[in-house]
Amino acid sequence: MSIAALSPAEWEVISLSLKVALWSVAVSLPFALAVAWLLARTSFPGKSLFDALVHLPLVLPPVVVGYLLLLTLGRKGPLGSLLYDWFGMTVVFSWAGAALACAVMGFPLMVRAIRLSMETIDPKLEQAARTLGAGVWGRFLAVTLPLSLPGVVTGTLLSFARSLGEFGATITFVSNIPGETRTLPLAIYTYTQVPGGDEQALRLCVISVLISIGALLVSETLVRRASRQVLGYDAIGRH
Amino acid sequence: MTLSVDIELIQGDFRLAARFDCGGGVTALFGESGAGKTTLVNAIAGLVKPQSGRISLDGRVLFDGRADVFIPAEERRFGYVFQEGRLFPHLSVRQNLRFAGWFRREARSQSAEFDHVVDLLGLGALLDRRPAWLSGGEKQRVAIGRALLSQPRLLLLDEPLASLDAARREEILMHLVRLRDEIAIPMVFVSHVRYEVDRLATRVLEVVRGQVLEEAQIATPVGTRP
């Protein structure tokens, strides 16, 4: 199957999927960094409950997450009506809503990877940074963030992959609208529901596999580069 | 320079009660491990908060339990050389040395000053290396340089020789003697080794089971200015 053989409809699905996944990752990253830092480096009352809430999308059925998003962000939901009244915008039935659903579903994976990475950083390095004049932000930007780079890369990729595969929350929250919210998994599902759609579904499956393999290869390279950057030598081997 | 310490600090079963003043030169905190030396230095640095008492430098209060004053470590401008170096592994030696300058205007050293410290500690050939590629002695020299270039009012050294072999220990000791005599920066030097204290200190305080017990004025140690 050559690239030239892809139909405009297939291109639309692929580019929409990539757009949704990239936005979902970009929007969740700052929040994931903050939450990972809170969980790794601070203690506060209700921390275990907070931790559980963050992990909820990992254990809930995606349809439940999608439905809860619809209830809160729908035109009549508490947040959705505010958004609509103040800014005249709505995320329901739009690609932005799809990105949001993906961001929520991928969030625990991203937080987890970053947090694990942050927890391996010796707090004594942050102490040393304090004696050299670095305040909370300075320590985060100059020590904690660069040293957790491998975890940030891993978490970003996990969440990106999760976004590419997201189905249940997306279809519940923003439905299955061609060109707007019909990402790869939704398109494959749609083809399997129509007579004679098998060939199309299979083609999109192959594309899915290729994109996933590509993402894995890129991430492996990036993680190795990040850890070399952090440690000053290659700890993973090869090269 | 006068550092006044009068604090009480309780950690679990351990109680530290310290009361002393120290001025210029090298003040050694000498005592067995577990006596509370590191805790005391951490309290001076502002990394741990005592339960009560007072710490001041030249009349400026850094900690006062009663008035609830606690200047955090990042604002005390005390250089701290840790036992294990604690260099930043993701930064080159040059970036480690310039680290404080990213946060403190006064530590944005002129190149002459940077070169002087690099020269004094023999760091010239190491500047572009990462800490992972340094020997123990080299790491400790970089750590001393990094603390010095933060323009500290006082240099705290917590067993800076403990993780080194005998030859390296001697080398770093010579560098510290040079710092004492050439840069004349006040130092608080923690050690459990009598020999190191004798070589470096101009004044010795003994720490025994959480108490600064005995205060001995040493005559001029070998090879120092009066």
Image: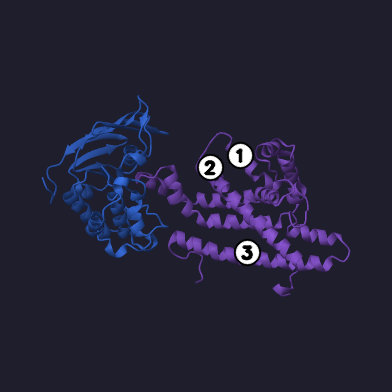
Chain colours: A purple, B blue
- The Cα atoms of the two marked residues, 1 and 2, are separated by 10 Å
Q: To which quarter of the image does residue B118 belong? A: bottom left
Q: Position of residue B52 (x, y in %)?
A: 35, 28
Instruction: Evaluate whether label 1 is on the same chain as label 2.
Output: yes
Q: Nearer the viewer, residue A220 or A137?
A: A137
Q: Position of residue A77 (x, y in %)?
A: 73, 37
Q: Nearer the viewer, mark 1 or mark 3?
A: 3
- Mark 1 chain: A
Q: Residues within 10 Å of mark 2 (few under 14, many from 20)?
A: some
* In the rendered image, the vertical position of residue B43 relative to residue B221, given as above or below: above
Instruction: Evaluate whether label 1 is on the same chain as label 3.
Output: yes
Q: Position of residue B101 (x, y in %)?
A: 33, 50
Q: Nearer the viewer, mark 3 or mark 2?
A: 3
Q: Which residue lies at the image location 69% right of the left edge and 58% below the top edge?
A: A164
Q: Residues within 10 Å of mark 1 (few under 14, many from 20)?
A: some
- Whether label 1 touches label 2, CB < 8 Å: yes
The residue that disc 2 covers is: A38
- The Cα atoms of the two marked residues, 1 and 3, are separated by 31 Å
Residue B163 in the figure: left or right of residue A98: left
Q: To which quarter of the image does residue B33 belong? A: top left
